[in-house]
Image: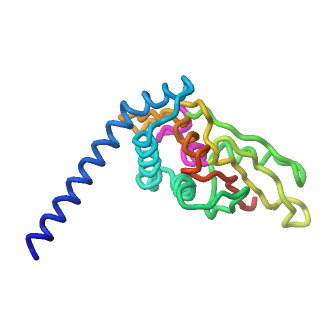
C-alpha cells in the first residue's frame, strides 16, 4: 500500500514538473508561434488551446497579490456562464480613476478612461491595479446621495473581451512578461473562456 502511494505521489510530482515546464516554455516562446498562426488565419491545435488555457489560469492564480481585481475577473472568465453584465465586488481606484470621478458634473455623465498598457501595467505604476483590471472603462455618475450633490454614486464598467490583436508587456520589476492577448480572445470566441461586462459600484 505504501509503495502504491509513493508511486502515485511520484507521478503527480512528475506531472506538475512537466506542466510547469510546458507553461514556462509556452509563455516565453510558444505563444509567439501561436499568435503568428492566428495572424495567418490558421486555427490553433488542441495542444495550443490547452496551453493558452493553462497560461490564462496562471494569470489569475498567480496574479492575486499583484492585481486582485484583475485576477478575480480572470477567474470568472473560467467558471462564469456567459452574461451581459456582472457586478463584481471590490473597489477600482487609481489617480486616473479619481480624476475622472471628480470631473463628473451631472447624473448620467460618463467619461471613458484608458491607459497605455505597457506603461500602466508595470508594478511601479500607481495605476497598475486599476489598469490591468478595467482598461479601458466607462466611469459614470449615478444618483446624488446628498442634497448639495457633493456625494454621489459612481459606476465603472469594462468589457472583459480581449482584443483580437494585442501584445502586452508586464514589467514585474526586473522581469518582463509578454502576453499575446489575442490568444485569449481566440478561446473566448470558441467558448473556452467566458465573456462579460464587469460592473463596479462605489460612491464619491
Quadrant of the image occupied by residue 88: bottom right
The magenta segment: 118-133
Q: Is residue 74 left or right of residue 34?
A: right
Q: Residue at x 70, y 52 (%)?
A: 197
Q: Is residue 72 left or right of residue 199?
A: left
Q: Position of residue 169 (x, y in %)?
A: 48, 33
Quadrant, the C terminus: bottom right
Residue located farthest toward the bottom when viewing the structure as drawn: 1
Q: Residue at x 56, y 35 (%)?
A: 182
| Type of colouring | rainbow
Q: Residue at x 32, y 36 (%)?
A: 25
Q: Residue at x 29, y 47 (%)?
A: 20
* Total number of numbered discs in the rendering: 0
Q: Position of residue 143 (x, y in %)?
A: 87, 62
Q: Position of residue 159 (x, y in %)?
A: 68, 47
Quadrant of the image occupied by residue 116: top right
Quadrant, the N terminus: bottom left
Q: Is residue 42 magenta?
A: no
**Residue 194 vertical placement versus 132 (above, below):** below
**Residue 70 vertical placement versus 151 (above, below):** above
Q: Is residue 121 magenta?
A: yes
Residue located farthest toward the left when viewing the structure as drawn: 3
Residue located farthest toward the top when viewing the structure as drawn: 40
Q: Position of residue 35 (x, y in %)?
A: 49, 29
Amino acid at each position: 500500500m505504501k509503495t502504491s502511494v509513493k508511486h502515485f505521489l511520484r507521478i503527480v510530482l512528475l506531472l506538475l514538473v512537466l506542466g510547469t515546464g510546458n507553461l514556462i516554455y509556452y509563455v516565453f516562446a510558444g505563444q509567439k508561434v501561436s499568435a503568428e498562426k492566428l495572424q495567418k488565419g490558421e486555427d490553433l491545435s488542441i495542444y495550443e488551446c490547452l496551453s493558452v488555457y493553462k497560461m490564462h489560469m496562471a494569470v489569475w492564480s498567480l496574479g492575486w497579490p499583484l492585481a486582485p481585481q484583475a485576477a478575480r475577473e480572470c477567474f470568472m472568465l473560467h467558471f462564469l456562464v456567459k452574461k451581459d453584465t456582472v457586478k463584481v465586488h471590490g473597489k477600482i481606484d487609481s489617480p486616473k480613476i479619481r480624476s475622472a470621478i471628480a470631473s463628473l458634473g451631472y447624473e448620467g455623465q460618463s467619461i471613458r478612461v484608458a491607459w497605455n498598457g505597457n506603461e500602466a501595467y508595470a508594478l511601479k505604476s500607481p495605476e497598475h491595479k486599476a489598469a490591468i483590471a478595467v482598461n479601458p472603462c466607462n466611469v459614470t455618475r449615478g444618483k446624488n446621495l446628498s442634497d448639495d450633490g457633493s456625494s454621489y454614486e459612481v459606476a465603472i464598467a469594462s468589457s472583459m473581451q480581449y482584443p483580437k490583436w494585442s501584445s502586452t508587456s508586464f514589467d514585474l520589476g526586473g522581469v518582463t512578461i509578454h502576453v499575446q492577448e489575442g490568444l485569449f480572445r481566440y478561446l473566448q470566441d470558441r467558448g473556452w473562456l467566458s465573456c462579460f461586462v464587469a460592473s463596479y459600484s462605489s460612491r464619491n
